[in-house]
Image (tube, rainbow, N blue to C red):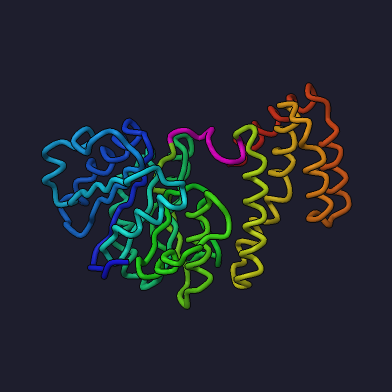
């Protein structure tokens, strides 16, 4: 990893999404304070992309103080490798990751400007949907960094802020336990190894445009969900102080698991019941909940579809 200079790199990994990348970059350049300050850098990883940086950036953007840098991979990289590739290009003391296609609010500048003053290794800027933006911002008239529960993280890539030197571990041959969860593993590993506290910003400054996306609402990805649960188990054992992981794991074993089972039944995946049955028997120790999940495994497709719609509606209300 390069020697770090003072400043913050805004890192955006991109795979074949010029439209989403342009939206994110445009939202960054709309923040005039950030452009004037000069301590911020834009680092974009083009993972097997055919378009050019001139398709995204105007001449004014290329000449701005944000100093945009585009790095192109030689071949397609899986998610975890693409994140490692992008981190290797960071030369500033701090870095924040933002998902391609998501929008940043102008006040992100204030959050990033204050973070280095915290003298910590990790921070989280929560991500919200456009619908939740107004209500979320109304709660905190004066945004600030606050102490976070050990182990806090965003399920999505966006909003994770690191001291770059704390990411040296990803140079190891096998730095991650699971596949395609690099951003969560980075967040948990840094917090688990750091002697400093973690911080969370009191207002979301990043907007996730499509609120319907995410691992808990996509059909046919139950195996990825199981991997996520297993990953939390590993980090719960590895780093005992990550109390938030315990709460996240408890939530993962409850309504999220039931929702994944209903998704599988809705899509008539007949091989799923035995797979889930064995996994439930091994991991779910609460007898009543185990009974509920087994009932869900036997649910007819039509009933599963109805309950699936109800569950998604409930999750939208809760989130």
Looking at the rendered image, the quarter that the N terminus falls into is bottom left
**Residue in the foreground of this view, choosing between 143 and 179:** 179
Work out whether 12 lies above or below 90: above
What secondary structure do most residues of the magenta stretch adopt? loop
- The region drawn magenta spans 209-217
Residue appearing at x 44%, y 68% in the figure: 169
**Residue in the foreground of this view, choosing between 167 and 38:** 167
Q: Is residue 217 left or right of residue 129?
A: right
Extreme-front residue of the structure? 75
Q: Is residue 215 magenta?
A: yes
Residue appearing at x 36%, y 54% in the figure: 85
Q: Is residue 6 magenta?
A: no
Residue 14 spot, x, y in % from top left:
36, 41
Residue 249 position by quadrant = bottom right
Looking at the rendered image, the quarter that the C terminus falls into is top right
Residue 49 spot, x, y in % from top left:
32, 37
Q: Is residue 188 left or right of residue 114?
A: right
Residue appearing at x 59%, y 68% in the figure: 242
């Amino acid at each position: 990893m390069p020697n770090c200079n003072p400043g913050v790199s805004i890192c955006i990994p991109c795979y074949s999404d010029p439209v989403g990348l342009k939206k994110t970059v445009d939202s960054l350049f709309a923040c005039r304070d950030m452009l004037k300050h000069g301590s911020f850098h834009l680092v974009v990883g083009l993972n097997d992309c055919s378009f050019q940086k001139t398709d995204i950036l105007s001449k004014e953007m290329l000449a701005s103080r944000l100093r945009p840098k585009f790095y192109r991979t030689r071949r397609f990289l899986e998610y975890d490798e693409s994140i490692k590739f992008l981190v290797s290009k960071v030369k500033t003391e701090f870095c924040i990751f933002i998902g391609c296609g998501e929008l940043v609010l102008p006040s992100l500048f204030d959050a990033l400007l204050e973070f280095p003053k915290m003298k910590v290794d990790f921070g989280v800027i929560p991500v919200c949907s456009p619908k939740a933006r107004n209500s979320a911002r109304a709660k905190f008239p004066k945004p600030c960094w606050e102490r976070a529960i050990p182990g806090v993280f965003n399920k999505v890539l966006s909003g994770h802020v690191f001291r770059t030197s704390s990411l040296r571990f990803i140079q190891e041959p096998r730095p991650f336990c699971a596949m395609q969860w690099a951003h969560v593993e980075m967040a948990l590993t840094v917090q688990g190894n750091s002697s400093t506290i973690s911080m969370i910003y009191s207002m979301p400054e990043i907007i996730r445009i499509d609120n319907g996306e995410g691992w808990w609402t996509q059909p046919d990805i139950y195996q990825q969900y199981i991997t996520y649960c297993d990953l939390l188990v590993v980090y719960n054992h590895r780093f005992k102080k990550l109390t938030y992981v315990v709460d996240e794991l408890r939530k993962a074993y409850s309504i999220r698991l039931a929702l994944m089972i209903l998704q599988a039944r809705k899509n008539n995946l007949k091989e799923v019941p035995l797979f889930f049955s064995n996994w439930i028997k091994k991991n779910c120790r609460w007898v009543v909940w185990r009974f509920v999940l087994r009932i869900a495994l036997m649910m007819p497709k039509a009933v599963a579809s109805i309950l699936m719609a109800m569950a998604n509606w409930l999750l939208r209300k809760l989130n």
